[in-house]
Image (cartoon, helix red, strand yellow):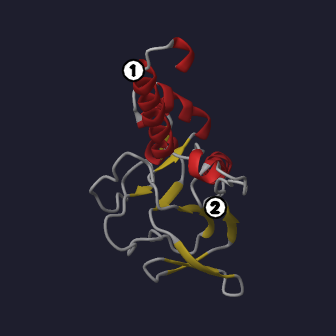
């Protein structure tokens, strides 16, 4: 999850961002839209967010198209920027791309929930709250998880860099080792 907090608000139909901030069940997911050809993007990481932005830029000329991203987190974490959190002040904003900012002025709606199942025959996804969301096209961009190979000692001593929390954990470990090294009398021991 993004280190920032989800804002306490409900559906913003007049918002230019098209973002639906979810604080309760996803009762407003999807937004009321009629007979639009809905493109559902499952996942809001790098691939899902990039897909939503590109579609949002290219589809405005098609009035009957709707872009809906389903993602539990309010931002996309730029993994390439996690080192800034690990070595500098622990500020998540270095690498968190907030959806309302990324999708500003784009016809992209976001439902902050998870997908529980997909029914390709019915062309529907079911979100965690049990609601079924129909789609015209479906993009599955759920990302990846770090893989730690089965090397003796690696799982116990290595850290992955996959989130702001991981970067902060690395920062704390490095700082702890610096404090230990500072107490060692001999330079060779440091």
Q: Name the residue furthest bottom.
A: 121
User: How busy is the neighbourhood of tag 2: few (under 14 within 10 Å), some, or many (20 plus)?
Assistant: some
Instruction: Identify the residue under disc 1.
Output: 183
Residue 121 located left or right of residue 142? right
Q: Between residues 89 and 62, which one lies in front from this camera angle?
A: 89
- Residue sitting at x 46%, y 41%: 169
Q: Name the residue furthest top.
A: 187
Image: 1 above or below 68: above
Image: 177 above or below 70: above
Q: Between residues 12 and 47, which one lies in front from this camera angle?
A: 47
Across and down, in percent, residue 128 comes to 47, 77
Image: 156 above or below 173: below
User: How busy is the neighbourhood of tag 1: few (under 14 within 10 Å), some, or many (20 plus)?
Assistant: few
* Image quarter (top left, top right, bottom left or bottom right) of the N terminus: bottom left
Instruction: Identify the residue under disc 2.
Output: 142
- Residue sitting at x 40%, y 72%: 26
Query: Which disc, if any, is residue 134?
Result: none
Q: Between residues 107 and 132, which one lies in front from this camera angle?
A: 132
Across and down, in percent, residue 59 comes to 66, 53
Find numbered disc 1 in the image and state the secondary structure of the residue it sits on: loop
Across and down, in percent, residue 86 comes to 49, 32
Q: Between residues 96 and 155, which one lies in front from this camera angle?
A: 155
In the rendered image, which quarter is residue 115 located in?
bottom right
- Which of the two discs, 1 and 2, labels the residue nearer the N terminus? 2
């Amino acid at each position: 999850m993004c280190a920032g907090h989800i804002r306490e608000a409900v559906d913003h139909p007049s918002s230019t961002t098209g973002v639906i901030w979810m604080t309760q069940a996803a009762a407003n997911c999807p937004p009321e839209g009629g007979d639009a050809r809905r493109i559902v993007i499952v996942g809001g990481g790098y691939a899902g967010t990039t897909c939503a932005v590109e579609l949002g830029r290219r589809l405005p000329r098609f009035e009957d198209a709707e872009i809906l991203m389903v993602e539990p987190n309010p931002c996309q974490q730029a993994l390439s920027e996690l080192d800034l959190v690990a070595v500098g002040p622990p500020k998540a904003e270095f690498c968190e791309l907030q959806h309302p900012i990324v999708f500003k002025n784009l016809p992209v709606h976001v439902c902050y929930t998870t997908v529980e199942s997909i029914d390709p025959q019915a062309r529907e996804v079911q979100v965690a709250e049990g609601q079924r969301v129909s789609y015209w096209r479906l993009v599955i961009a759920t990302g990846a998880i770090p893989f730690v190979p089965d090397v003796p000692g690696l799982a116990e001593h290595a850290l992955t860099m996959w989130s702001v929390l991981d970067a902060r954990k690395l920062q704390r470990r490095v700082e702890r080792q610096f404090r230990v090294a500072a107490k060692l009398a001999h330079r060779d021991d440091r």
